[in-house]
Image (spheres, grey):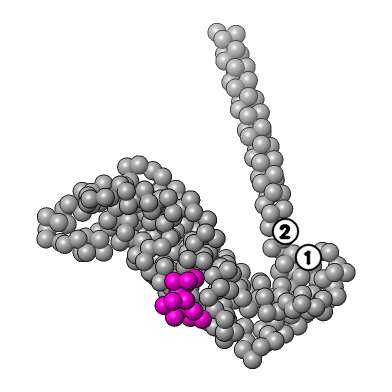
Amino acid sequence: MTEHILQNTTTARDVETVRARELRRHRINAVLRYALLGGVGLLMLYPLIWLIGASFKTNSEIFANPGFWPEKPTLDGYIAGWKTSTPYTFGTFFLNTLWIVIPKVIGTAISCTAVAYGFARFEFPGKKILFASLIATLLLPNVVTRIPQYLIFRDLGWLDSYLPLWVPSALAGDAFFVFMLVQFLRAIPRDMEEAARVDGANTIQTLIFIVVPLIMPALISVCLFQFMWTMNDFLGPLIYISSVEKYPVSLALKLSIDTTEAFEWNRVLAMSVLSLAPALAVFFLAQKYFIDGISSGGIKG
């Protein structure tokens, strides 16, 4: 009896020892994994960290000090960069950017939702051909369509205005967003829509009150994509806008760089930090919905 008790005690100790070793190994693996991820993340974020630090340096210190921490922090880059070399402050260019971004985001959300709903829920002649044509436009580089679009907008008299930037988005010109919403809609059962129709709701009411709340994560992802892409767009405003007072931030940054070698880099870096701030803030505030929209889009219900 005593030998049996001793054997059980020894077995219990062995089990505890094995568990302790596994727990220790798990902790070591976790520490190594997070250390590796942290190192890679720091390596990827270092250019952004350096950008922020260099914006507080003088122009001479940027080239003399390769580190990101300024020896004598100064706001001269922000003050001089905000004034710009034009009669307008950088605030004007920020307002112009918002005047481009907000209509594009709203137009994209409304038009792409309507087109995606039609492709996902209705049957009509030529549906497969039209959808295939829509997907085929994803394979076309933007450079191919730049000249035809420019000629069309020139003939319409829309040059030096925001209409060439607004109208394509308001007419579901971004095929990627339509495709994304179609895939999301196909993963949603039609039970609630059919129940709404039984209760007397028409197509528009069903779309607004039933479908839109269900696809809200994907819709937020669409708005985030459009917001960030429009904030970073340089070529579109460069082609269609010629008046300085209508320049967005992307073109205004170029104004700080002249053809000589004497321009102030700290001004450019300071205004670059301010230009990045809205996109980063919006992305982190809506990160949860962004991830839900991306991950749910490929799941079949």
Q: Amino acid at mark 1?
A: Phe
Badge 2: how crowded within 10 Å, few (<14), some, or many (20+)?
few
Classify residue 269 as left or right of residue 157. right
Badge 1: how crowded within 10 Å, few (<14), some, or many (20+)?
some
Q: How many marks?
A: 2
Residue 223: image location, x then y, percent: 44, 64
What span is in magenta?
A: 150-165
Under circle 2, the secondary element is: helix
Q: Are marks 1 and 2 in contact (CB under 8 Å)?
A: yes
- In the picture of the structure, the residue carrying the numbered disc 1 is 68
- In the picture of the structure, the residue carrying the numbered disc 2 is 46
Residue 155 in the magenta stretch? The answer is yes
Q: Residue at x 66, y 36 (%)?
A: 29
- Residue 162 in sight from this viewpoint: no
Task: Name the residue nearer the viewer: 276 or 109.
Answer: 109
Q: Amino acid at mark 2?
A: Tyr
Q: Earlier in the sequence, mark 1 or mark 2?
A: 2
